Amino acid sequence: MSSPIKVKIEAFRAIDHLDKCQEYLKGHRKVLVHHGLTNITSNDNYWIEDPNVYFLLASDESNNSIIYGGVRIHIKTKNILIPIEKAIFKIRPNIESMLADKTKSPFAEICGLWNSKTVAGKNISLSLSTGAFALLTKLGVKSCYMFNARFTFRITKSLGFLRPDFSPYPNEYLYPNKNFKSYIWLNENISELQTLHDNEKNLVQKLRKNYLQPMTESCYSRDVYIRYNLF
């Protein structure tokens, strides 16, 4: 049996690690271009100067220059639109109040998720998202949104997110283009884990007890060694 791949997942505050921001952006843009997607709001770089943005990077444990993927956390603050709001604002100008009315403040958005082809099928995107979710309570967040299309529904559901009812407005948007139907997802109380799937619930509980620890996660009969460092 082959040895498990070894990955480290680290968390950073954007304004304190501009070099790491550039690594994240380079990898994210490469993946988006590969899929022909260039108009996604989470692809903007305005967030690197926002003190309320954090991000996670997955890299090779023995070589920091090999980046496998990333994900971001945007904490909502007054007068600054988070990516989901920027994406929908033109067609739903009241999106800020729509989101605020459904949540407990402060709330955040997990967004900008990507992984390289190198680790396709290794569940790195789920590991990144679960790490980000675990970190939310440490950042003082009470509720969290995600905005995605069908190809990442599995991740959203695994982390206990549900689609809120925004009646009379629909919760379906043609984004990032007419070929994709994207939906708003909400986990209204991230401190309680009743709606998470068992594997993700167990991992979140472990990480919230110790944000710096190694894990061995199984994926399609092959182990993936992940060392989490969520500061």
Image (cartoon, rainbow, N blue to C red):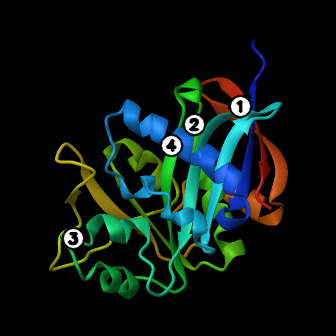
> Between disc 2 and disc 3, whose residue precedes?
3
Mark 2 surroundings within 10 Å by alpha-carbon count, few (fewer than 14), some (14 through 19), many (20 or more) = some
- Residue 147, quarter of the rendered image: bottom left
* 4 or 1: mark nearer the eye: 4
In this view, the residue in front, 115 or 212, is 115
Mark 3 surroundings within 10 Å by alpha-carbon count, few (fewer than 14), some (14 through 19), many (20 or more) = few
Kind of residue at disc 3: Lys
- Residue at x 83% of width, y 61% of height: 210
> Between disc 1 and disc 3, whose residue precedes?
3
Q: CA distance from mark 1 to mark 2?
A: 9 Å
> Between disc 3 and disc 4, whose residue precedes?
4
The N terminus, quarter of image: top right
The C terminus, quarter of image: bottom right
Q: Which residue is labeled 2 in the image?
A: 123
Check contact, mark 1 vs mark 3: CB within 8 A: no
Q: Residue 81, position in %: x, y?
A: 41, 75
* 4 or 2: mark nearer the eye: 4
* Residue 161 located left or right of residue 66: left
> Between disc 4 and disc 1, whose residue precedes?
4
* Residue 196 located left or right of residue 154: right
Check contact, mark 4 vs mark 1: CB within 8 A: no
